Image: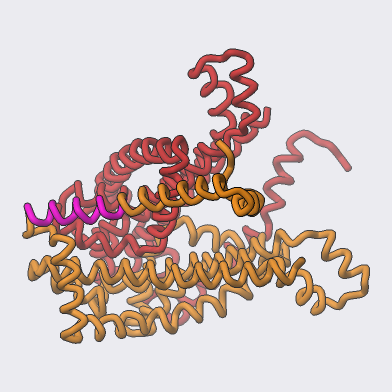
Chain colours: A red, B orange
Amino acid sequence: MSERRGAPALRGVLRLWPQAASAATVVGLWELDSSLRHPTWLPTVESVASSWWRLVTGGAFHVAVTSLETLGIGLAVVLAAGALVAGLLARFRLLDEALTPLLNAAMATPVVALVPVFVLIWGFSDTTRVIAVVAFAFVPLVLQWIVALKSVPEHLKEMAHAFAGGRIALVRTVVLPAVAPLLLNGARIAVVQAIKGVITAEMIIGVVGVGKLIVTASETFDMAQLYAVVLTVVAVSVASYLVLSTLEHRSSRWADA
Amino acid sequence: MADVAGPASAGLAAARPAARRAVLGHAAAVWAVRLAAVVAIAVAWELIGRRDSLFVAPFTTTVRHLVDLWRDGQMGHAMWRSNQALLIGFPAAVAAGLPIGFALGRVRLADRAFGYFLDMMLVVPMIAAVPVIIVALGLTLTARVVVVIVFALPFVALYARAAVRVVEHHLVEMAAAFGASRRQTWQTVIVPSAFAPVFTGLRVGLAHGISGMIVIELTLIPAGLGGLIVNFRSSFATGDLYGVTLMILLEGFVLVGAARMLERWVARRLGKTDV
């Protein structure tokens, strides 16, 4: 075994060969099928790429700013409200036992059905979309955070008390490191759900943001643009997920340290 | 601050009347709080609706419209139209998702090559794929079935993958040591230990399948329940809109609740036979 410098990084990349091979196969089949049979629903790879480039250079992606704003405000609301509710439920056992089953049951409901009601109440406004984000992300976040907050090991709390630590010191030195990975896991779920909420609301409303791009492209049968927008949404969702996963990983190492 | 849950304390409670009263008192308090929360939501809904009935139908009105929609046949018709997609799509998602999940869980190379596509489907807003499906398949039942499959399958498959992945290796090795064939190993070791998580995957997949069924009707094919919603919204038939929405939420509650009960029942049976 040669232990040259740079070899681990290279090996790390080489280890991804199955993923790379399957991705290449998918793109290859896509290219082959689209250029040989020309199915209506599958534009060629090049046309999607050039359409994407037109969207970028032509400034069409500016509408994404609206989507990101909605996402940001919605996430801020949902994280604050989620922290409050999860904190209450984790602190008071009676509330937890009484209400957590209700939240679990709410997970079974198709939240998307509520979007038309939001549209009726708040019209095609920003509020509608922010509410949709909150509705998509709130319950999963709260359920995850209750688990996180209840997972502080009792013996750690007792030890901190024995060393006469104050409340803030307790939170900083004991609670936070113990629950940080789980809290971030909840935040990751919230972000995934929030992105779904934005795109869903925008597609049902059909006149704003990235959802408008998707709806317009599909109504004008501009397949190349449709694929360009959808694949961008996919890339952004996956990227934000990966960033949060990395953070979670880091924090769990910090917690173990 | 005694822990009142769990079989040990239940036995204790049976032995001592005072302790049993405490347990019953606690259960009553839990139910009181739960009921109070539900009633508070219904009352708040009712009051807001009474003040502003153009945009919010009061709770009682919503229920009345829901009953009326069933009576005049609109709801039954829409429920049948919508649920056709679920009725075909969900079993198809299970039939395809379970083998995929099992294969990815047991064959490492397959998982590394293809597993991440499923992981991505979990993270990505699948609603964005709906227009592509419609262009490919048209405004048909097939398109609606495919959307249900696309929504439900990742959950079914990923839970199945996790279920067969965590099978205790020493059990598999022991089975091999006793000369079990590949098939016997699956029958006696892998399937029993994987049952509960697989079932959870089916339940979560079902919930998402219901979402998929509604999503396509709300965005691009205004048929069935989604069609009713689109009509009622544009004609400002607030009571009817709320009635249909409540019905969809109820369907989710009932179907997924039934799946959860079935899951608990199966888990109990398996728990008994394991010991």
Secondary structure mostly taken by the magenta-highlighted segment of the chain: helix
- Against A90, is A219 above or below? below
Q: Residue at x 14, y 52 (%)?
A: A122
- Residue B66 occupies which quadrant of the picture? bottom left
| B102 over A105 or under it: above or below | below
**Region rendered in magenta:** B37-51
Return the residue nearer the eye: B179 or B108.
Answer: B179
At x 54%, y 21%, the residue is A170
Q: Is residue B39 magenta?
A: yes
Kindly tell me whether residue A69 is visible in this rendering. yes
Q: Is residue B110 left or right of residue A102?
A: right
- Quarter of the image where the N terminus of chain A is located: top right
Q: Residue at x 32, y 84 (%)?
A: B140
- Compared with residue B62, is residue A66 higher up or lower down, i.e. above or below? above
Q: Quadrant of the C terminus of chain A?
A: top right
B253 on left or right of A3: left
A233 and B52: which one is in front? B52
Q: Residue B188: x, y in percent?
A: 78, 74
Of all residues, the one furthest to the front in this rendering is B17
Question: Looking at the image, which is closer to me, A136 or B72?
Answer: B72
Q: Nearer the viewer, residue B126 or B153?
A: B153
Residue B44: in magenta span: yes
Do we see residue B131 in this rendering? no
Q: Is residue A103 left or right of residue A179?
A: left
Identify the residue shown where x is 37% and y is 36%: A84
Where is residue A77, by image quadrant?
top left
Residue B178: x percent and y percent?
93, 71
Q: Is residue A167 left or right of residue B166?
A: left
